[in-house]
Amino acid sequence: MKSYAYFPGCSLEKMAHSYHLSTIETARALGVELKELEDWNCCGATAYFHVDELLAFTLCARNIAMAEQQKLPLVAPCSGCYKNMYFTRDHLRHDADLAEHINDALAEDNLKFSGDSTVHHLIEVFVNDVGLKEVKAKVTHPLKGLRVAAYYGCQILRPKKSKAEDVEQPQFFEDLVAACGAEPVPYPLRLTCCSGALIITNREAALSLVRNLLESAVQAKAAVIVTACPLCQVNLECYQKQVNREFGTELNVPVMYFTQLLGLALGLPPKRLGLGSELVAVMPAIKEAQRVEPALASTS
Amino acid sequence: MNAAPTPTATATAAAPPDSGVSFVEEIGHLLYASKGNPLNTCIQCGTCSATCPVASGGFMDNSPRRVIALIRAGFKEQVLKANTYWYCASCYQCTVRCPRNIDIAELMYGLKRYTVWKAKGQEDLIGPTFTETFVKTILRSGRSYEPVLATTYLFTYGLPEMIQEAQTATALMIKGRLLLLPARIKRLDNFKRMIQHIIPLGDKE
């Protein structure tokens, strides 16, 4: 069994609690052990980095150092947390002076950063460490006929982590959707930003970006958008009503986490995956696909 | 310095700094814990501006390309008063596409830090206030807490937006998606002492 130190992040405590639930459930079903980091702190989102880089690195380093204490790689389901901690480790490993300075601070909490624990996004763990072949083998309820817009967003891909990484034409998310038996549709805006924290700091721009993403999914005839980030999910789903109000649109696109999609394909009950807490219900879209699919299959 | 186009709109505030350190050096050195960013290699191709969803949506008063040109030409005031960097959503699309490997998103972070420290910048933006509240919340408890953050922007809204926001919040609350009480980490004392090593927090509690 593969084990990881699990960093849920602030969003998953409440706003994205369904992401937490479905993470735990799918990890268990795939034989991945997640040990929640004891006493983790906020990764800082983008705000720490707006004020002070050293502070931002220190707060991320505290979490990484706790994973190192457990001698486990660190996994985060939130793209923002993942990006912050991934690059903190990267910078600290390449800058001994910076690491030393930060270790002085970490000593107050009896911690030390060494760089031994790698940092991963949850989707990376499922796609690379578990492997799509293994995922596919465990799928008992393939989601046939479900048209899915696999939405990467930003920070699982960017900034680039290595020269070899394909940040323009990635495929792993669509592959995972296909492994669940669903149908990934061509989604032109799959790499375009959901507006992130601008939903708070610049509502006008944010709602416009969200609208583009939703309309692109509708044009692609996607039944659901699947995300790997709590902020993407909240922006695309919870602000849909406000988009409709502002632009006179009638958008009603369900937005779910990849762990929820995967969980359904693994035969887990919707409730245990936190389904039902959305503002735009997901299950009707799933059921509709299941209802239509036999007809599609017989005509093809 | 022949590559930078001359800014036309508000050229009056332009004044090269007299400290011996040019604005482009000052800004370039703000990044990566002083590792620098090669702003002078910018070829003004505009890939950053075209690729930026906020700039191409027409929401930035100066595009990222133009901001780089302004920095290089020493137009400090225009740069700091622009909304550009506070409207950056950190999507890093410009960074991965820049043919000169300038980390433009990181440049935007640098400009945010610069104006936060120097308390300069465009007034009536929500970004700086939000940042301040966010950081304070975390320094107090180790965790973020959405309802406190909401107070930073709600008062800037007009009544219709405020009502819409309240409706969204109510819907989320009904679904059990809002924390009613702020969370906090356990080893908060250690955590605060750790932060004291990095930035002064004022009087110890």
Image (cartoon, coloured by chain):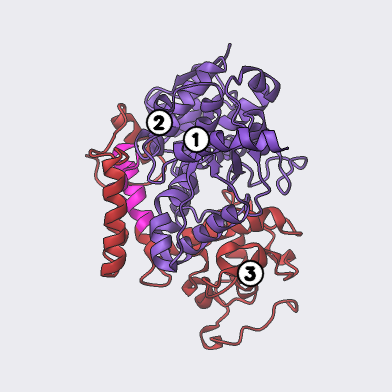
Q: Viewed as shown, does residue A169 lie left or right of B152?
A: right
The numbered mark at residue B68 is: 3
Chain assignment, label 3:
B
Residue that carries the numbered disc 2 in the rendered image: A274
Q: Is residue A209 visible?
A: yes
Which of the 4 quarters of the picture holds residue B187?
top left
Instruction: Give the residues drawn in magenta, as a range.
Output: B130-150
Q: Residue at x 69, y 53 (%)?
A: B96
**Residue A272's spot in the image, x, y percent?**
41, 24
Q: Residue at x 57, y 18 (%)?
A: A30
Give the secondary structure at mark 3: helix
Q: Rounded to the nearest whole Å, what is the CA distance between mark 1 and mark 3? A: 51 Å
Q: Residue at x 61, y 42 (%)?
A: A147
Give the secondary structure at mark 1: helix
Which of the 4 quarters of the picture holds residue A180?
top right
Residue that carries the numbered disc 1 in the rendered image: A287
Q: Rounded to the nearest whole Å, what is the CA distance between mark 3 and mark 2? A: 45 Å
* Figure colour of chain A: purple
Sequence order check, earlier mark of 2 and 1 = 2
Of the pair B178 and A265, the residue shown nearer to us:
A265
| The N terminus of chain A: image quadrant | top right
Mark 1 neighbour class, 10 Å CA radius: few under 14, some 14 to 19, many 20 or more: few
Mark 3 neighbour class, 10 Å CA radius: few under 14, some 14 to 19, many 20 or more: many
Chain with red colouring: B
Of the pair A57 and A3, the residue shown nearer to us:
A3
Which of the 4 quarters of the picture holds residue A15?
top left
The kind of residue on which mark 2 rests is Gly
